[in-house]
Amino acid sequence: MKAEGQETKRVPGIKAGARTKRKTLFLQLSWSWKGLVDAFRWDIVVSTVTSDAEIRANMLKSLLLNSLSLLSIYVFDLLLQPLVRDQQKWLHRNMGWFYRVLWLFPVVGASLYLNSSWCSIVANRVYSLRHGSRKAAPSTYTGILTALATSAYRAVMICTSVVITFALGYIPVVGYTAGFVFFCWVDAYYCFEFIWVARGLSLAQRIGHLEERWAYYLAFGLPSSALCMWGSTLANAAVFALVLPSYIIMAMHAKPVPPNPYNPVPALSETSTIQYPSPFVPIRIPIFAPVVWINDRIVRLLSVGGRRSQQYSRGVGMDKKKGMSDTIVESVEEGSGNGASAESLRSAARGGIRVAGTRRRKAN
């Protein structure tokens, strides 16, 4: 026991650490609120759509086709499926199957495919209105190959993200919440992907940008994710396709915070002390690490050709220690980066590698 009148020693470092932790948590909450506010800027969507005919036309096409998809889905779920349930005749029993194959799947598939092109047109138009036209990528042999590689990797990444979202739902107790939170980040990523690509950010830079501002993007993706978590899988996909153009417009006008996650409160003057964030609150959360890891393994499994595949990888400058996300996809999207030369691709396909104008062949 302490003697009477003896003062308790205070450790200033502990109080300062707790104070820094509270400030950092407050900053994260303020960034989340900023993301939520940016996700409800429907006034920007309305003003943008009404002010430009090209944007208005593509938004209208997206609205009509995705509304048709939703109507078809709910006609089946609420009307046809209850009517044909427990029917004895073969035709009646398989009516739902015929409806899905002959009408529902083609309509939803066409809607998702066309919606991606309309979203690209809307994104490019909004970007040009705000920042001016960007330089188009040259239509070369290399550009075609790298565009195909990028599209394939992006498709695999979308599928992987959806699979991980469903897999998280099977975790006891916290599974549904974890899946919903992860889906918020996935939605936010695809809303901002268009402007990131337009600014020339590589895949690694885009992922790092989101993971270092996880609070903002979690809140930004919250409204769209909440709309896409209540219906069937097809209905959720159609709803997301319906609202995606609007959220792309919001993302084009948004300003994610903080500008510098590692120094969120810059010093007011050269003599003032820099206030670093608390080490107990993570600056960067590796949200997409499982997605990128699975993607790279899938791409390697799909790579066929044995020795020729390895020669191709060396010819385009791929490192065995790196995944596809760190090589081709980073440097070639939308004309950003140099990528591989067409000559190196052709020489790699023939079995040799051209370096500095000299062709080297493997010794027999």
Image: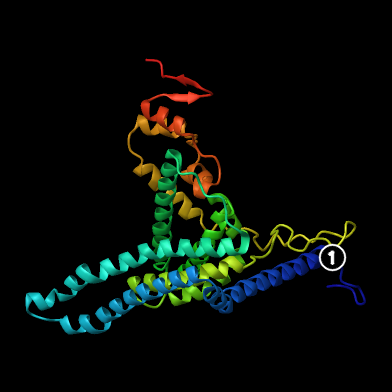
Q: Foreground residue, 50 or 147?
A: 50
Q: Residue 63's spot in the image, x, y percent?
A: 40, 75
Q: Where on the picture, by quarter, is residue 51?
A: bottom right
Q: Is residue 1 left or right of residue 22?
A: right
Q: Check disc 1 and report its element: helix, strand or loop.
A: helix
Residue 191 position (above or below residue 141): below
User: Which residue lies most toward the right here?
Assistant: 5
User: Which residue lies most toward the left here?
Assistant: 89
* Dot 1 amino acid type: Pro
User: Which residue lies most toward the front here?
Assistant: 53
Q: Where on the picture, by quarter, is residue 94?
A: bottom left
User: Residue shown at 40%/55% (left/top)?
Assistant: 155
Q: Quadrant of the N terminus?
A: bottom right
Q: Residue 172's spot in the image, x, y percent?
A: 42, 70
Residue 175 in sight here: no
Residue 203 position (above or below residue 189): above
Q: Residue 215's spot in the image, x, y percent?
A: 61, 67
**Category of crowding for the residue at label 1, using alpha-carbon neighbours closer than 10 angstroms: few (below 14), some (14–19), many (at least 20):** few
Residue 168 in sight here: yes
Residue of label 1: 12
Q: Is residue 109 left or right of residue 23?
A: left
User: Residue shown at 30%/80% (left/top)?
Assistant: 74
Q: Residue 206's spot in the image, x, y percent?
A: 56, 55
User: Residue shown at 53%/77% (left/top)?
Assistant: 50
Q: Is residue 219 left or right of residue 231?
A: right
Residue 155 position (above or below residue 51): above
Q: Is residue 298 left or right of residue 318?
A: left
User: Residue shown at 54%/62% (left/top)?
Assistant: 192
Q: In which quarter of the image is the C terminus?
A: top left
